[in-house]
Image: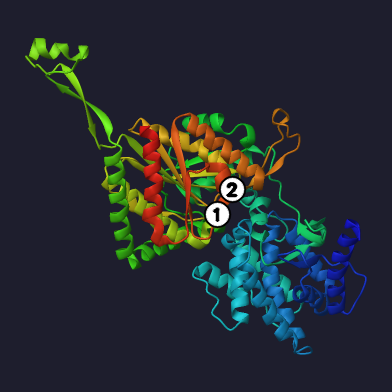
Amino acid sequence: MTDTDCRFLARRRALNMVWTAAGEYGFDPVFLAFTQDGLPDFYLNSIIGYVQKWYDRDTMNRLFDTIGNTVLKETLDGLLWIGLENCSFLREVRERPVLSEMRRVCAKSFFNQQLTKSRQQWMSQNSLVYALQSARWRTVLGKEPGLINPWEKKLFEELAFREAWDADQITSHATDIFRRYFRLGQSSLPLSLFAKFRGKAGSLIKKGLPHRVIRAEDLIFTSDSAGNGIITPRKARTFGPISALQEENDRLYIESCFGFPLFGYDENARAEEAFCTGHHRECHLYFASGQRAPHTGDDPLVWRMVRGAQVQAGRNRSHYQDKLHFYQNSITRLAEQIRNALLVYPQPSLVRSRSGALAPAEIWRAVWLDDERIFTETFQEEQPDFSVDLMLDASASRLQNQEVIASQAYVIAKSLRLCHIPVQIFSFLSLRGYTVMRLHCGYNDKDEDKKIFDYFAAGWNRDGLALRAARRLMEDSPAKKRILIVLTDASPNDDRRMPSDVHDKHRLSRNYSGEAGVEDSSMEVHSLQKSGIHVMAVLSGGDGDRQAAQKIYGDDFVRIENVRNLSDAVGSLLQKQIEKMRS
């Protein structure tokens, strides 16, 4: 069977499901539904058919067209179908009782597929559509919705479209919801919100959901590695110049989410000019100070992220307190291992004395102060002569491990400070083309290590650009020798593509993921090492690709299968780095 035949059959299967449920054949539905694997979803395609069966088609199509003309199309489509699924199910189940079991199977499938998602697909965990869709399927299985955010709770309640409503009532209720929650007019979106909600945000919301209801016009028919026909949504524009208005609104969005900038405009512009080149041109950098202004805006996406970050900070602190005894023991053990490494590899220190090598710069002391200590002697001592930076991957692939990552970083930082080693902590992620470098604690903030518990995950991770930007943050180190420890899953992945580069033998742009992302990250690690910065990585739990880590970091990484092994694993790795610096 040819690739074209596979594509045709995949679409035909989805259409037949819709037509059968509608009791009518030959019409072209606005939407089709597919599972995470790109296969037609039987239950949701049936729901699409029931909507065609029970509600006036012209009225519903006008509603679909109104939403389709906005930059919030993907978000509003997802929310609308949560409501339409509810009312069309209630209507049809009276005639087809077996639909209740089909609905429960769909709900179970949603959560089963969630457990097997690839790391890119965890992006959906950070979306409004995912949260409300998950709440709906939880209620189908007889559970509480699981929503914490009052704004989301209220929106979810209003998406329970009623069985008795007709198409006009659905349209009126849906547009009222979108007007009140998203400031959406009947036919357009206010210009002030245009850039804030442009297409990329919507693509993140829909990408990776276990079940997707997708506009037929946005489908791409392709094939998987085995040659089977699959259907996927079109990708949002992820490369190329954008308007000045869009760019400014994106910057304001990033600042609203992550706080005040660490550097002034001119200094940040110089950093972008230096680092956003080659594979990273058309990308941006934002260095966040970690200090967030009170949120007073009316942007629901910003509000949701800020509120989510606050909730996660509380979870991080609660996790650490719940396991306080264990983590305190880990700090004690790791600090002892670091001290032992410093004792084994002491550094030379020059001390003024009355004998030894003459120090010309000190002769004035003998003339004017009668100080005979104008010579220097070399002593070996364990006082550290290096600093350590902790760089935490804060992309959405880390959503399942945020509490553990924050606690691990705190253990490492606290242990190093107990050994009088300067430590700086920052995290990185990418959103809307910006790689955000968020400073949690500086070298001199000895009593501020607990700010690491403000860590939260969202977005993508452009590791290569983050490694470049780390160089700027490490410039303030008080030590000549520097170590960079990256807490990561070694899976670079960003929605902004790598541009074509004739000199690099790549005439076409490439996705920043897989082999291309690993290759770029490896190149940046080597660049840091050439400049004298020692780079090592810590992969935690079941996350992380060992083969990719090997390509990026060589032998300078450790994988922590169990958090109980944290002290020994990191201690051994640090000892190896200290030995390298002294050799």
Q: Amino acid at mark 1?
A: Gly
**Which label sits on residue 548?**
2
Residues 534 and 455: in front is: 534
- At a point 75% along the width and 61% down the height, the residue shown is 66
Q: Is residue 340 above or below residue 453?
A: above
Residue 491 location in percent, x, y? 58, 50
Image point 29% across, 40% down: which residue? 344
Query: Dividing the picture into quarters, in which one does residue 215 lie?
Result: bottom right
Q: Is residue 142 visible?
A: yes
Disc assigned to residue 544: 1
Looking at the image, residue 250 sits to the left or right of residue 413; the answer is right
Residue type, mark 2 in image: Ala
Q: Quadrant of the C terminus?
A: top left
Question: Does 174 sit above or below residue 335?
Answer: below
Q: Residue furthest left?
A: 370
Quarter-wise, where is residue 28 in the image? bottom right
The residue shown at (52%, 42%) is 553
Mark 2 packing: few (<14 Cα in 10 Å), some, or many (20+)? many
Q: Nearer the viewer, residue 201 or 461?
A: 461
Q: Secondary structure at mark 1?
A: loop
The x and y percentages for residue 8 are: 89, 62
The extreme right residue here reads 26
Looking at the picture, tell me which residue is in the foreground, 575 or 284.
Answer: 575
- Using the image as rendered, state which of residue 529 and residue 501 is in the foreground: 529
For this view, does 244 lie left or right of residue 478?
A: right
Which of the labelled discs sits on residue 213, or is there none? none
Image spot of residue 492 (x, y percent): 59, 47
Would residue 93 be found to the left or right of residue 479 on screen? Answer: right
Circles 1 and 2 in contact, beta carbons < 8 Å: yes
Quarter holding the N terminus? bottom right
